[in-house]
Amino acid sequence: DQLGGVLEELSRNPHSRRLVVSSWNPADIPAMALPPCHCLFQFHVSSGKLSCQLYQRSADVFLGVPFNIASYALLLAMVAQVSGLAPGHFVHTLGDAHLYLNHLEQAALQLRRPPRALPRLVLNPEVRSLFAFSYQDVQVSGYDPHPHIAAPIAV
């Protein structure tokens, strides 16, 4: 339970340099259909703020990366809350960033759209354990998306 271990270490020693979770297991790679794309993340505490850095070895910029950003930003906010820290920065490092040919038109459409105000993440402040969160404890306020852009998943 790597994440549980990180939470325990964070409570004992928030300035630890060992707050790392890795999904990369070289012995298992030959049996995998696809090795983990987002394969390592690390938490870091500075000035009472918890930051998270994600290393992603392979990054589908149009479909995968936005989902990964939202997911890890949510994880960062949740871990910060249950650790009694303020959320800091989410840093996303991409190894092989790629835009698939069958996503070029969709990406061009996305880039033509004017940015809208960022939504705000609101977590139930009563939740004190990471594993006690449920979907009802997570709210997104001020979310005003543009219409959906369909794109096939490339493997």
Image (cartoon, rainbow, N blue to C red):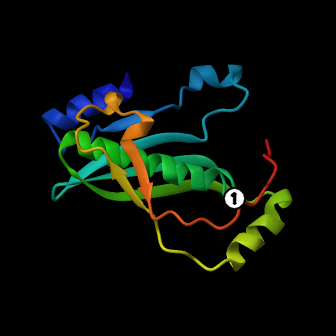
Residue 16 in view in this figure: no
Depth check: give the residue in front, 26 or 45.
Answer: 45
Label 1 crowd bin: few (<14), some (14–19), many (20+), radius 10 Å: some
Q: Percent from the top left, x then y, of residue 133?
A: 36, 33
Residue 19: percent from the left, percent from the top? Answer: 30, 38
Quadrant of res 12: top left
**Tag 1 residue:** 62
Q: Quadrant of residue 109?
A: bottom right
> Is 115 on the left-hand or right-hand side of 32?
left
Can residue 30 be seen in this snapshot? yes
Residue visible at 74% across and 67% down?
Answer: 107
Locate residue 66, reporting x and y percent. 59, 56
Q: Residue at x 37, y 26 (%)?
A: 2
Place residue 99 in its image quadrant: bottom right
Q: Position of residue 70 (x, y in %)?
A: 50, 52
Between 34 and 140, the one lying in front of the other is 140
